[in-house]
Amino acid sequence: MRMMVDGAWEISHRKGWIGGDTIDAFQGKQYGWRVGLMRRLQRLWWGKAQRIIACSNYLRSIAVSNYGVPGEKVRLIPNAYNGPAPDSLRESPREARANLGLEEGPRYLLTICRLMVWKRGRDHRRPQEPARRRAAPGGGDGDMLEPWKRYAEEQGLAARVHFLGNRPYADIPYLIRASEVFVLNSTYEG
């Protein structure tokens, strides 16, 4: 089984059962019966797995220390990028934008992530820089796709914010090359 998050925390966070507590605060706190049930199910799920692959030592320690999973059962295998080598891209930023169908002229800010509340997508705009001066392509999808689209519309940014959805690995170097800034503004990463 591949472990990317403490599932009990993610579900409890998404359902609003923990008042927005971070994954760190969640580990040492007691909550209501729903969260207790999620933790028991997480422990059962991980207990039945023959092997757990954690993408970081941080997550590995959660499984071992907080859920009692035997250490020898949890292997660390960091996430990998399987796309083209970034230095294999020969196109200029202008050519990369053309390849992606992005308009020439705006300065692009990029984020690539699963669109979840802890990614803080609403915070990508700096207050001192009016949003109308930047366009932001974003790759990924997730629970916050529709709320962030609505937010962009409410803020008058819908024409400038592009939600690109899941993109093939081959697009990633082009997205990076087409952008001036990359932002991953998360309060949590595995």
Image (cartoon, rainbow, N blue to C red):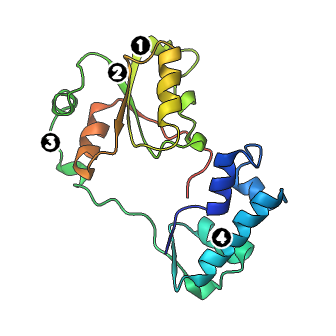
Label located before the other in sequence (1 or 4):
4
The residue at which mark 4 appears reads as 42
- Residue that label 1 marks: 133
Dot 3 falls on a residue whose secondary structure is loop
State the image quarter where residue 48 is shown: bottom right
Q: Nearer the viewer, residue 75 or 153?
A: 153
Label 3: few (<14), some (14–19) or many (≥20) C-alpha neighbours in 10 Å = few
Amino acid type assigned to the residue bearing label 4 in the image: Gln
Q: How far apart are the two marked residues, 1 and 2, measured between alpha carbons?
A: 8 Å
Q: Position of residue 69 (x, y in %)?
A: 66, 81
Task: Tell me the element at label 2.
Answer: strand
Marked residue nearer the N-terminal end (3 or 1): 3
Q: Amino acid at mark 3?
A: Arg
Q: Are marks 1 and 4 in contact (CB under 8 Å)?
A: no
Say which of marks 3 and 2 sits in front. Answer: 2
Q: CA distance from mark 2 to mark 4?
A: 43 Å
Residue 154 seen: yes
Among numbered discs 1 and 2, the one appearing first in the sequence:
2
- Rounded to the nearest angstrom, the CA distance separating label 3 from label 2 is 20 Å
Residue, disc 2: 107
Q: Amino acid at mark 2?
A: Arg
Can you give x and y, in whole percent of width and height, for residue 67 in the image? 71, 74
- Chain-order first, disc 3 or disc 2: 3
Q: Identify which residue is drawn at 22% across, 29% down.
A: 97
Residue 6 in view (yes/no): no
The residue drawn where x is 46% and y is 67% is 78
Mark 2 and mark 1 in contact (Cβ < 8 Å)? Answer: yes
- Sequence-wise, which precedes: disc 2 or disc 4? 4
